[in-house]
Image: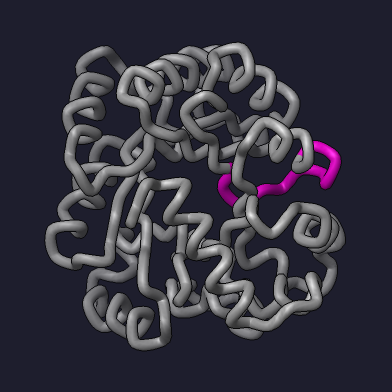
Amino acid sequence: MLFDSHAHINDERYKDDRHEMIMRAYEGGVRWILVPGASLESSVSGVALTREYEFVYASVGVHPHEAGTMDDMTLEMIKDLARDPKVRAIGEIGLDFHYDFSPREIQRIWFKRQIQLARSLDLPVIIHDREAHREVFDMLVAHKAFDHGVIMHCFSASKELALEYVNKGAYISLAGPVTFKNAKKAKEVALAVPLDRLLIETDSPYLTPEPFRGRRNEPDYVRFVAMTIAGIKGMTFDELGEATAENARKAFGIR
């Protein structure tokens, strides 16, 4: 009973075998998949996938890489999509100071406005944070995002910051990098974060876990993330899978 809490299964890399890939995950025990939005286009296609598969849910939003494409009309269209009953969050939104594909001030403006949108709809936010750790946290606090729920996608900061998030009621999601041999920080986070605040994800088609690192990722591989974290926390695969699935269902309001 696994929940892949972040998988871009609407990505073009699945165009030739999307159905087979989705069913392979389901038959492998992945009972829920959440497809995050990264642009208006991917938000639309993610919501469309929820019509085809009962166990697929979506979030809608615009990634910091795409913040330069945002305007009031785009935000209004995201808002309209968010009213769909299978849309369970706004995201992935946040700040990315590694690539700076959009100017930082533009990223900040649209991060704030999408947090405000989530608050107006009483939806949680799914956060992308790359090399902007303290600023992301401070913005989430300043704009009261924690009142409605925060999911930290593919968490890459320290265990100390992870526990600050946990103390605010956030969920910490870990992906394929936790399986890498040199992933000391991710393993420390996995050990430190209480079980009831952990989620697992693939971020498919990216961040493929061992032993398939270097290939296209897919939701079926979330089990390798679960296996690794279970070993770190000294529990069984089934215990870890069931706990993180229940956490994700709570985070996204799925019963």
* Rendered-image quadrant of the N terminus: bottom left
Q: Please state the extent of the stretch shown in magenta in the rendering.
A: 152-161
Q: Residue at x 17, y 28 (%)?
A: 80
Percent x, y for residue 228? 71, 76
Say which quarter of the image contains residue 114: top left
The one nearer the camera, 163 or 128, is: 163
Q: Quadrant of residue 40?
A: top left
Camera sees residue 65: yes
* Left/right of residue 230 with respect to residue 109 in the rendered view: right
Estimate the x, y position of residue 255 in percent, counting from the top left: 33, 57
Which percent across, then down, holds residue 41? 23, 41
Query: Residue placed at 17% from the left, 40% from the top?
Result: 84
Residue 49 placement (x, y as % from top left): 20, 59
Magenta part, dominant SS: loop
Check if residue 158 falls in the magenta segment. yes
Say left or right for 17 vs 132: left
